Image (spheres, rainbow, N blue to C red):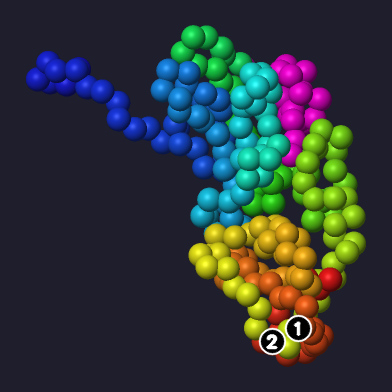
Amino acid sequence: MNPSGSMERELWQSFDYPTDILLPGMKLGLNLQTGHEWFLRSWTSEDSPAEGEFTLNIDPNVSNQFIIQRRGEVLWTSGLFPHWRALDLDSDFHFSYTSNEQERYFNYSQNGNFTSFPTLQIDSKGSLTVTGALSISCPGFEGYVRPSSCVGYFPDDFELNWARKRGFMSADGFKFKGSNNMSRDDCATKCLSNCSCIAFAITNKNNNTACEIWGRGSKFKEDNNNTDARYICVW
C-alpha cells in the first residue's frame, strides 16, 4: 500500500526473467495461473549476450526434473528430484521443489556462510556449470565424452568428419541474412542440412557468431601464416 492508501501492484521483477545463471532464491519452473515460465537461456557465444540456442527448463511432461534443450529438442534430462542421477551438486546447494495449484518450480538456497553465491549456469555450448566447474556437457560437436543422461544432439563421431583448418576458400560462400545471433553449432546445422555444403565458418571474429557456408565447386587453401586467414571447418 502506498502513502495515499491505494494498493500497489508489482509489475516486474528481475528474478522472474533470469538469463543464463540461476541464483539462490530464483525459480526454475512454471506459473500455472499466468503461463509464465522461469528458465535459463544461454548466450549466443562467450562474447555475445544475445539469446543463444540452449535452455535449462523444468520438464513440461515430468514435473520434477530438469531438461536441457537446443532449439526445442531435448538433449539432457536430470532424472527425478531428489534423486538426480546426472547433476553433481555439492553441499553448497539446498534444492527444494514446490508444486501446487498456482505454480510448480525448483529453487535453492545456500548452505553455510559464503563470500560469493553458489551458481548454476548454462553456457553458450549447452554445458551446465556449477559455480564455474563443468558438471554436464552433451554437445558432441565439441568432442566431449557424453554422459548417459544425454538424449540428443549431433552424432558422437560428428567432429571426426570435419577438419578445422586455417586458410581461405576460393570463392565467397553463402551468408545467412540476420545470422549475427547464430552460433557455431547453428552454422554447423545449416551446413549439415544442405547436401552440397562442404565447409562452414563463423564470420564475426569479435564474438564468434554469424555464419557462412560453401558448396561444391569452392576449394579450400590452407594458410597458417597469413593474419587474414580464417578458421574454416572443411568436409
Please give the name of the residue rendered at 45% of the width and 28% of the height, measured from the top-left corner.
Answer: 36
Q: Which quarter of the picture shows residue 233?
A: bottom right
Answer yes or no: is residue 28 visible.
yes
Mark 1 Cα-neighbour bin, 10 Å: few <14, some 14–19, many ≥20:
some
- The relative height of residue 165 versus residue 224 in the rendered view (above or below) is above
Is residue 190 within the magenta segment?
no
Answer yes or no: is residue 110 visible.
no
What is the three-letter code of the residue carrying label 1?
A: Ser
Q: What secondary structure is marked by label 2?
A: loop
Q: Which quarter of the picture shows residue 183?
A: bottom right
Mark 2 Cα-neighbour bin, 10 Å: few <14, some 14–19, many ≥20:
few
Is residue 82 within the magenta segment?
yes
- The relative height of residue 107 versus residue 233 in the rendered view (above or below) is above
CA distance for labels 1 and 2: 6 Å
Point out residue 109 in the picture as x, y percentages from the top left corner.
Answer: 58, 23
Q: Which mark is residue 67?
A: none
